[in-house]
Amino acid sequence: MPGENLSRDEAHERAALLSVDGYEVDLDLRSAVGESDEAVRTFRSVTTIRFRRTGSGTSTFADLIAPSVNAVTLNGRPLDPAEVFDGARIALDGLEDENTLVVDARCAYSRTGEGMHRFVDPEDGEVYLYTQYEPADARRVYANFEQPDLKAPYRFSVTAPEEWTVWSNGAGERDADGVWRFAETAPISTYITCVVAGPYHYVTDTYRRGDLEIPLGAMCRKGLAKHFDADDVFLVTKQGFDFFHDNFDFPYPFGKYDQAFVPEYNLGAMENP
C-alpha cells in the first residue's frame, strides 16, 4: 500500500528527482548476543547517504522500517524524527543540489527472513545473523532509497562480537578498533547488498584460470561442520566458473566468491555480488 510500499509512480518521480553518489552504512550487531527481551531486541544502524538533486523539486523521502529513529540530519540540519519519520519513510524537504543525509536508527532483528535475520542454534546456543533483502527489505537494516534504478556504491562497517567473523559484498577485515570494514562496492541496488555475521565454520580455497585468481569461501553453522562437504562444494563451484568463462569469455568481475549456507533461509537461494 502507498505509504509503506513504493508505488511505480513514486519510484518514477524519485528517480527523476535525484541521483545517489554513495552510501556509508555502520552497523553495531553486538546486541545479537547476551540476555535481552527477544521481542524488543534491536541493533544500531547509522547510514550516511550522499545524493544529488538532478530534477525539479525540493522534497522527497528515504525508506526505513525500524522501531525507532534516534536522529536525522539533512545537510547539517537536524530534523525531528517525530515529525519526519512515520515508521516506513523519512520525509526530506529543502533539498539542495548536493545533499548529505545521516540517519541514526534502531533496527529490529528478524525471524522471518526479512532484513537482518537472527538465528539461535538450539544445539549449542550460538547466534547467527544474515541479511535477506529481496525485494525491498534493505530498508529494515539501513535507511536508503529502496528502488533498483537508484544504484550506488556502498561502504559497510560492522561492529560485532569479538569471536565472530563478518562478511559483506566487498573484501573486509577487522581493524585495530575491532570494527569490520569492507571495500566499497561498485554501484549496485539496495536489495543485493548483504551482511553475514557470526561464529560460522568457514573453509577457503582458490579458483585459478590463467592469470585470474578468485578467493573462494564456504560457510555453515558450527553445529553442521562435521557434515559439511566443502571439497564437493568447491569442486562444483570451480566447474561452474569454468563453464561460464568458456561460454561468456568474460572474467568473473566481483573479486571474491563466498557461499553461505545459513539457517532458516526462506527463498532457497539468493545471489549477492
Image (cartoon, helix red, strand yellow):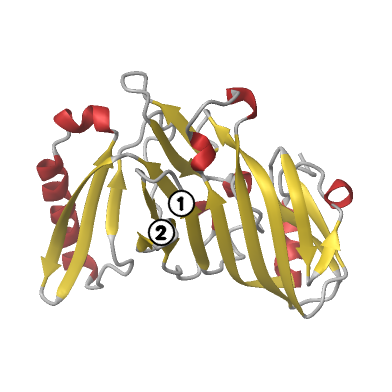
Q: Which of the 4 image quadrants contains residue 71?
A: bottom right
Q: Which residue position holds label 2?
A: 169
Q: Could you say where residue 168 lies in the image, as x and y percent from the top left? A: 41, 55
Give the image location of residue 131, x and y in percent.
47, 43
> Which of the two residues, 74 or 17, is positioned nearer the viewer here?
74
> For the residue labelled by badge 2, is the local secondary structure a helix, a strand or a loop?
loop
Judge whether residue 220 can be spotted in this image: yes
Could you tell me if the residues under marks 1 and 2 are in contact, i.e. CB atoms within 8 Å?
yes
Give the amino acid at mark 2. Asn
Find residue 88 and report its horizontal and vertical position in percent: 74, 44
Q: Give the amino acid at mark 1.
A: Cys
Q: Quadrant of residue 201?
A: top left
Q: Residues within 10 Å of mark 2 (few under 14, many from 20)?
A: many
Residue 194 is marked as: 1
93 or 19: which is nearer to us?
93
Which residue is located at x 65 percent, y 28 percent?
Answer: 40
Residue 23 appears left or right of 97: left
Q: Is residue 98 above or below residue 145?
A: below
Mark 1 residue element: loop
Point 40% across, 44% down: residue: 197
